[in-house]
Image (spheres, rainbow, N blue to C red):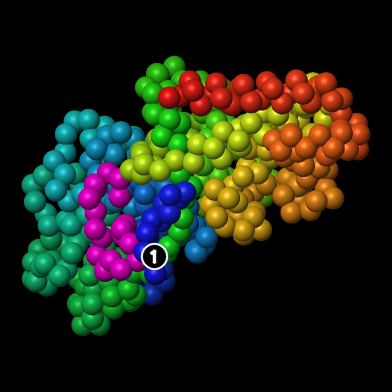
Amino acid sequence: MITEISPVFDYYYVARQPIFNNSGEIWGHELLYHSDSKDQTAEIKNDNIASLCVATSGFTMSQFYQDASRKICIHFTETLLLDGSPQGLPPSITVIEIPGKTIPSTRLLEMLTAFRKEGYTLAIDAYVGSDPQKNLLDYIDVVKIDISTRSMQEIQGVFSGLKGKKILKLADKVDNREDLQRLRSMGCDFYQGRFFAKPIKLRGRKLKATEISKFRILQAFENPDLEIETVHDIIKADPSITYQLLKLLNSVVYGFSVKIESVNRAINLIGLKRLTYWLRMVVMSDLSSKSQTPELYTLGLTRGRFLEDLARQGEIKSSNPEKLFLFGMLSLIEPMLEVPMEMLLEELPLSDEIKNGYIDNRSIYSKYLQLAIAIENFDLQVIDEMCLELKINKKNVAKASSSSIAWANAMVKSME
């Protein structure tokens, strides 16, 4: 049982409830936000933050528990819909749930049209057939009906109002076989409720980005001429976001068989547009927390920059600078998350060369890391030994060390 929140990472709880079709097969899952492990219902103090938590960390975690063909239904607030937040998730499996009390504005209808063009499935929650809801019918694919608040006669009336439209009907809170049979006879398509399965809670932990980095990212996204190089620099400067991005790309929904060796490679795989929307969600979700780990954050940046500089100077010829920066920056993920490195490496789509650098002291990458650590500890004997073994000029090591420290500190200071 959790008695307090760790200062290093957030605990989050996402409940996952299956949705079945008329053949008894799972069509998809709805992700629901829970504030802690004791909750039977969601305790949401901020609807936007709750939705963002589900759409970022919850979505990524859910992909490790199901096959990639099944839909993921996520409730988005009207604010997040207008902001385009759902576009950070893959259209092929994402079902965007619209609040049932939404009043369709011109701007909202434009966004819903854009979502459908991109391939997203759109659903309206708590559908009762009101006039504002009927105005949304030409823009959605699924209506979700809470049968616990309606008689079967009323539900039949709602279904009748949908005749002639290519809209699927999802019955929520189906708790017994009798209701299921009646709904089937009325032409219902999907079913969700405790008769099938109670929501299964998935508990996870996400590493917090520093507040300064979050504000810098949000500020950068206000620029309409945002370039991929800027996004690249933002991600490189934040170990937390790098970690979450790699986990996302390693989820079954993307199914990349390649190994990620640099932040730049990760950006190219996911695409700039989808990446910026995803980053917005991650940042806004993380902003709900106040804790920081500035020392580890700065040290990770310093290590990454140090190894990158050595490669750019030609002292390390076995790997490219980008790959070495990623390796150095992520070398402190274990103390940041307080989770064994072996467990973390199972979740990250890194090359075997990088992974071995963290767990095999004899590997070449491990030796690079040992050199960086020796410099941090001012261990002159180990520095001499490693420079000799790696055939690295000590003058260039000193140069890279001082410049990497200055760069990391300047990076942190610039974001204050």
> Is 117 on the left or on the right of 395, as rendered?
left
Q: Which residues are magenta?
A: 33-50
Depth check: give the residue in front, 337 or 114. 337
Q: Is 35 colored magenta in this rendering?
A: yes
Q: Which residue is mark 1?
A: 2
User: At 18% across and 57% down in the image, what residue appears?
Assistant: 126
Residue sitting at 77 percent across and 23 percent down? Answer: 398
**Res 339 → quadrant:** bottom right
Front residue of 268/318: it is 318
Q: Amino acid at mark 1?
A: Ile
Relative to 44, does residue 23 appear above or below in the rendering? below
> In this picture, is 223 found above or below 200?
above
Count residues near mark 1 (Cα–Cα under 10 Å), then give few for <14, some for 14-19, many for 20+: few
Residue found 34% across the figure and 35% down from its top: 84
Please tell me whether residue 245 belongs to the stretch shown in magenta: no
Q: Main secondary structure of the magenta part?
A: loop
- Total marks placed: 1
